[in-house]
Image: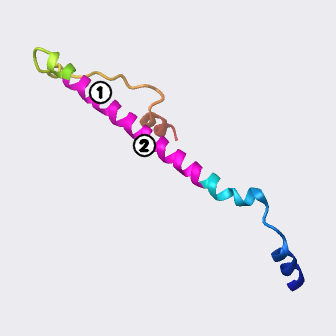
Amino acid sequence: MDDLLQRLGAMSVPARLLQLDDAVLAGLAERQSEARATSRLLSAAAFVALGIGYAGGSILPTPARAAGGDLVIAETALAPSTLLDLL
């Protein structure tokens, strides 16, 4: 085992291994710039959505009100409460 480690220590470092650090740091820098661009895009989208919501709410002449009367919902044969009755 010692002989193997001595031979490995005597070997020269491959050129691709020497370039690995630069490639990793370049990849990290690219991901950071993409993250910043994504953050700016999401911030702009939120600002536009807020503006559209504010403008849409301002356009209506009267406030919205709930409709009167009862809401009628028909019971279906596949509703969970009816399926449990079959068991």
Residue at the image point whose x is 20% and y is 21% from the top: 55
The quadrant where residue 11 appears: bottom right
Q: Which residues are magenta?
A: 25-54
Marks 1 and 2, Cα distance to the nearest angstrom?
Answer: 18 Å
Answer left or right for 69 relative to 30: left
Mark 2 Cα shell of 10 Å, populated few (<14), some (14-19), many (≥20): few
Q: Which residue is mark 2?
A: 36
Residue type of the residue flagged with mark 1:
Val
Locate the N terminus by quadrant. Answer: bottom right
Residue ID for mark 1? 48
Q: Residue at x 83, y 79 (%)?
A: 5
Magenta stretch, main secondary structure, is helix
79 with respect to 44 (left or right): right
Tell me, yes or no, whether the highlighted magenta stretch contains residue 40: yes
Residue in view at x 73 percent, y 60 percent: 17
Q: Give me the residue at 28% from left, 21% from top.
A: 72
Query: In this view of the protein, which residue sits in the foreground, 71 or 87?
Result: 71
Q: Position of residue 62 (x, y in %)?
A: 10, 16
Amino acid beneath label 2: Arg
Q: Is residue 12 magenta?
A: no
